[in-house]
Amino acid sequence: MNRKDPAKKFLRLCATGKVREAYERFVAPGFKHHNPWFKGDADSLREGMEQAAAKFPHTTIEFQRAFEDGNLVAVHSKVQHGAKLRPVSVVHIFRFKGGRIAELWDIAVQEPEDSPNQHGLF
């Protein structure tokens, strides 16, 4: 079973403001997440994602790479919340139960204005 495609579809829907649709289509009952800014339940993260979509209606997401190992999927993305804002490198790690997302971790780093690393975040 390919789990990379549903993970990317979930992220694309969330990034384009279709957060409820993403949750209805892809999130498993009992979903939990590890984002430290919200309670660990599905509703709290969904509400936070909806607020972010309202605040940044022109968000884009470009998938850089995706890996799958059993029921785990990792997706590295370039997220841009607006043309004048610095891009953010985000890694989402999903644990699937069947074809649905049961657990989610996310790690984000905003691209610095001046980095000595010639390879960059992407």
Image: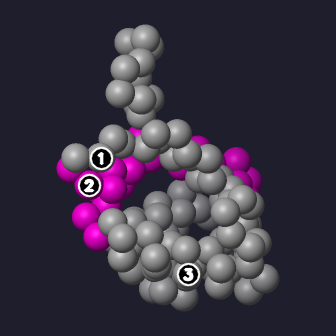
Q: Position of residue 105 (x, y in %)?
A: 68, 56
N-terminal of the pair, mark 1 or mark 3, is: 3
Give the residue pinned by disc 1.
Answer: 85
Query: Does residue 72 show up magenta in the picture?
Result: yes
Task: Report the span colored magenta.
Answer: 57-83
Q: Is residue 26 left or right of residue 87?
A: right
Give the residue furthest to the left.
83
The residue that appears at 50% across and 73% down in the rendered structure is 49
* Residues at circles 1 and 2 in contact by the CB criterion of under 8 Å: yes
| Residue at the disc numbered 2 | 82
Residue 111 occupies which quadrant of the picture? top left
Which residue occupies the foreground of this view, 17 or 52?
52
Could you say where residue 40 lies in the image, as x and y percent from the top left?
76, 72
Q: Is residue 34 visible?
A: yes
Residue 100, above or below 87? below
Q: Residues within 10 Å of mark 3 (few under 14, many from 20)?
A: some
* Viewer-side residue, 7 vs 107: 107
Position of the N terminus by quadrant: bottom right
Answer few, some or many: residues within 10 Å of disc 1's Cα (few below 14, many 20 plus, some between 14 and 19): few
- Dominant secondary-structure state across the stretch colored magenta: strand
Mark 1 to mark 3: distance in Å? 23 Å
- Residue under label 3, please give it: 47
| Residue 121 percent across, percent down from the top left | 44, 29
Identity, as a three-letter code, of the amino acid under mark 3: Glu
Task: Please state which amino acid type lies under the numbered disc 1.
Answer: Leu
What amino acid is labelled 2 in the image?
Gly
Residue 15 falls within the magenta-colored stretch? no
SS class, disc 3: helix
Residues under labels 1 and 2: Cα distance? 5 Å
Could you tell me which secondary element the residue under label 1 belongs to?
Answer: loop
